[in-house]
Amino acid sequence: MKKLSIALVLLVFSFVLIAFENTLAPDIIDFAANQQEVEQLRVWLDDSEGLFMDALIPEFNKIYPNIEVQFQHMGALDSRDRLKTYGVSGNGADVFMFPHDHLSLALAEDLVYTLPTSLYTTLNAKILDVAMDIATAGTRATADPKLYAVPISIESVFVMYNRNLISDAEVDALETWADVIEYSATFATDNPGKQLLTTNSHWADNYYLQAFYSAFGWRPHGVDGIDPTEVGFESPALANALTWLTTELKPVVTGNNAHNSAGTTLFEQEVAAMILTGPWAIQGFADKLGRANLGAIPFPSMTGVDPNVVADVKTFAGSQMVAVYKYSQHIDAAVKFVEFLATETAQEILYTTSNDCPALTDLSGIAGIATDEFMQVMLAQLATSIPMPTIKEVSFYWAAAETMVINVWNAAADIATEQKKAESSYLASKALGS
């Protein structure tokens, strides 16, 4: 009898539970099924004030709410060395940023995760060709292209000028570098103590000088800049370029002074009317001189300037790259983040917060860029630019090239001799580096 009573009680209790469950079911939240674990992603970007990332992260989390981005400012030139030190300990970044010419080094140091083929296909259809050429490290034209990083921005050198010193009409008349050189004498006579042109760097900076080298038919590492077997310092085309630079351009920019005697200060102090520069300098010049007083043009043409000129100006195109650390414990989340950087949303945030030029082919959706004089001039320049070499051997090019130009520029050293010395220096550095 007692067992029967217990059974009846249990039966009634079961019916009550079922009824209770059916009543509350719509309001019950199944945390196990609906709440996913938050994944933390460490990101190193060169964003000193955090303006870009402050705006970017909320937009990223609208799509990926379960990825928590932990941002740390890291200079683009520092990220590789820091990652080599801290990456293996687990205290490095999952995503890191570096400039175009560090890609080959990052690959040689085994730091970069090769991004999915599907992402390559997506970006190949929406990113500027020259930026994709850099991000694929010379593999884009092969049967098996590899995407090593996402180009977050694109850049080239161009010319800015001060309307307080030279009018738009006067600048428009400078169609070729022969015009620039001829007008320099007139400008100096009409404006005592001033000069027409200076540079944002120095006159042995081969990133800038490539515009002139290209006109004479020369670039380092072969026709496409991807030949690891040669650098080409002893080329007659380079000799012709160096001859023109030091006999025609040098007299009107530094005269008898050294390669680094005429730089940014002359433009900022309104001593020089024009300057070879890039997008990194726009905001600083605008703050000092007033944006309305500044204008911009692409490099004047080299066509017909010298009998040895075989092409027109082709500047180097550079790009800031964002890559996934090869040994990250959060590869999938990291890939999602770098993929998001190539969206129109992210690229517009980059432009509005950093004044960097998006790497997208179609910029019609980026508010304000269509009327941005400096961005439009740089984009026009980029239309004929060539990609920075990304093979690891290029890291041995820069120092040898700079020393070559300094010796020719400052001491009128024999060009052929300096070319041979540069080739020997390059080969020695390459052998030591290997």
Image (cartoon, helix red, strand yellow):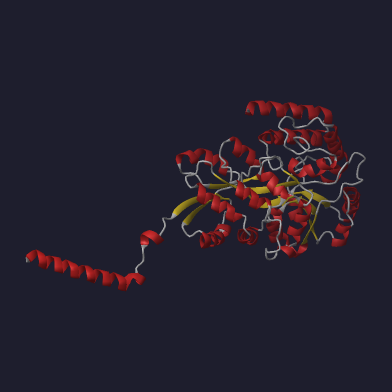
Q: Nearer the viewer, residue 432 or 94?
A: 94
Q: Nearer the viewer, residue 101 or 383?
A: 383
Q: Is residue 145 left or right of residue 164?
A: left
Count numbered badges in the picture.
0
Q: Percent x, y for residue 321?
A: 63, 47
Please name the residue shown 58% across and 56% down the image.
340
Q: Nearer the viewer, residue 123 or 118?
A: 118
Q: Nearer the viewer, residue 87 or 144?
A: 144
- The picture quadrant where one finds residue 168 is bottom right
Q: Residue most toward the bottom?
A: 23
Please name the residue shown 81% across and 40% down the image.
213
Q: Percent x, y for residue 94?
A: 51, 47
Q: Percent x, y for residue 249?
A: 85, 43
In which quadrant of the rendered image does the N terminus lie?
A: bottom left
Residue 269 seen anywhere in this rendered image of the structure: no
Q: Is residue 352 left or right of residue 22?
A: right
Whether residue 366 is situated above or below residue 332 in the rendered picture? below
- The picture quadrant where one finds residue 270 is bottom right
- The picture quadrant where one finds residue 22 is bottom left
Residue 430 seen anywhere in this rendered image of the structure: yes
Q: Percent x, y for residue 434?
A: 63, 27
Please name the residue shown 40% across and 61% down the image.
34
